[in-house]
Amino acid sequence: MADPVTTPTVVDAPAGLRRERRGWYLYDWANSAFQTTVITVFLGPFLTTVTELAAGCELGADSCDGYVHPLGVRVAAGSYYPYLISLSVFLTVFVLPVVGAIADRTMHKKRLLAGAAFTGAGATIAMALVTGERYLLGGALFLVANIAFGAAVVVYNSFLPQLAGPDERDAVSSRGWAIGYLGGGVLLALNLVAVTLLSEDGNPQRTLDLARWSIVSAGVWWAVFTLVPLRWLREHPTVEAVRGGGRNVVTDGFRQLGRTLREIKAYPLTLYFLLAFLVYNDGIQTVITLASQYGTEELRLGQSTLIVTILLVQFLAFGGALGLGALARRIGAWKTVLLSLVLWTGVILGAFRLPAEAPLPFMILGAAIGLVLGGSQALSRSLFSQLIPAGKEGEYYGFYEISDKGTSWLGPLAFGLVFQLTSSYRVGLVSLLIFFVVGFALLAAVPMRRAILAAGNTPPRVL
């Protein structure tokens, strides 16, 4: 008799498994709208403007030296949003491993995914209430939405080892990431078209309102498209979850997290991979975060050029994720990620040599980022899935998400320090090379086959 908690295979139920995978892909389509429309484009300027209003600045002013006092702390209006990002990262470090531990202990992982996703989407939709000077409400809603976003990603990622065997995982992960970039790009394009058509010259209030409703649209998109994976995915309880049946999954999750933190030293190669990912992913995230600032401040490019480049990155990342996923089937995911880090090094060197006030070269560089971005992230996710002990997918993906988001201040810090010393954005950008060079060296030193076997898993035929 088949074990009810074993991983499904193509032989078991090909039609059902394909349907589950399509549902899994569509959650990436759903939540990527939050990352692109909200985080990348609209929320920072929107919330900063609301905070400036609360600080007594006029709407549409070029600059503002005013201060607000959240919880009695004196904060410059322009610093409020960056401080919120830092606070959300800090809180995420504590929340995500706990959510992962609960995901491994619950019989109803889809409910956990639904709870996190709808909480985040609901907080995003509630941004419609952030009018006038309600910067505190906007900050609180952002914290809830961003933490819920990360929690949902942990649960979502934990499905991957249960939906694909070792030899299929790279392709499945790449398809999910590609579809996510496509979904995020579609909504962003629709919002940018709406802003372009409906905005009025000399009317900053109109611009602020359009930004608010663009943010709300991302919450609606996230919530609506989450319904599909919740319908098509099946529960995949771990053996421990089945054995633990009626126990309190929250307290049990906390206990298990404590045990895992004590036992994780038994998997040093998994930790070594996480260290490598922490370093090179920090470089990737910093390039993405600072690309617009580099374009405006150093290259003196207009807003329209930046918008077109953002869309190029989104849509080309779709093809890039699929392309590098196909390459991984031929040479293995480990070698493909190493190759992508070489390409990222080329991107940095190319950015250093870009001429000022030249939109076309900047767009070409954006296209190169798009082609390498999706694949390097998708294959890192599938590689890590091979290094997770069975039944602990949620917990380990909680640690993975911390490595993804919890250290994303290191690259910007290095960039900022170098700029402060040299007053050159170009030199600051080149300083990021160290993240890709060191990350490459660390990843190249991981004996992947031995690491996979040490975690108790079967290595794929091609690594």
Image (cartoon, rainbow, N blue to C red):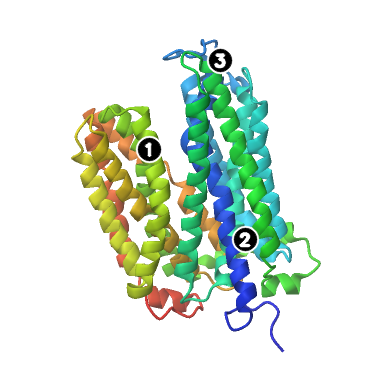
Q: Nearer the viewer, mark 1 or mark 3?
A: 1
Quadrant of the drawing holding the N terminus = bottom right
Report the residue at 38% width, 51% height from top.
316
Image quadrant containing the C terminus: bottom left
Give the label on residue 308, or none. 1
| Neighbourhood count class around disc 3 (C-alpha, 10 Å): few under 14, some 14–19, many 20 upward | many
- As drawn, is 110 to the left or to the right of 303? right
Is tag 2's residue or tag 3's residue first in the polypeptide sequence? 3
Residue 451, image x and y in percent? 42, 74
Q: Viewer-proximal residue, 257 or 127?
A: 127
- The image quadrant that residue 236 belongs to is bottom right
- Position of residue 99 measured from the top left corner of the image (x, y, whole percent): 64, 55
The amino acid sitting under disc 3 is Leu
Q: Which mark is residue 257?
A: 2
Q: Which residue was labeled with disc 3?
A: 53
Q: Position of residue 246 (x, y in %)?
A: 81, 67
Mark 3 residue element: helix
Comparing 266 with 51, the one in front is 51
Asked if the residue under mark 3 is in contact with the one under mark 2, i.e. CB atoms within 8 Å, the reply is no
Q: Amino acid at mark 2?
A: Leu
The residue sitting at the bottom extreme is 1
| Crowding near the residue tagged with mark 2, few <14, some 14–19, many ≥20 C-alpha atoms within 10 Å | many
Give me the residue at 65% from left, 73% from top. 16
| Element on which disc 2 rests | helix
Q: Is residue 384 left or right of residue 206?
A: left
| Three-letter amino acid code at the position of disc 1 | Val
Q: Does label 1 or label 3 sit earlier along the sequence?
A: 3
Total numbered badges shown on the rendered structure: 3
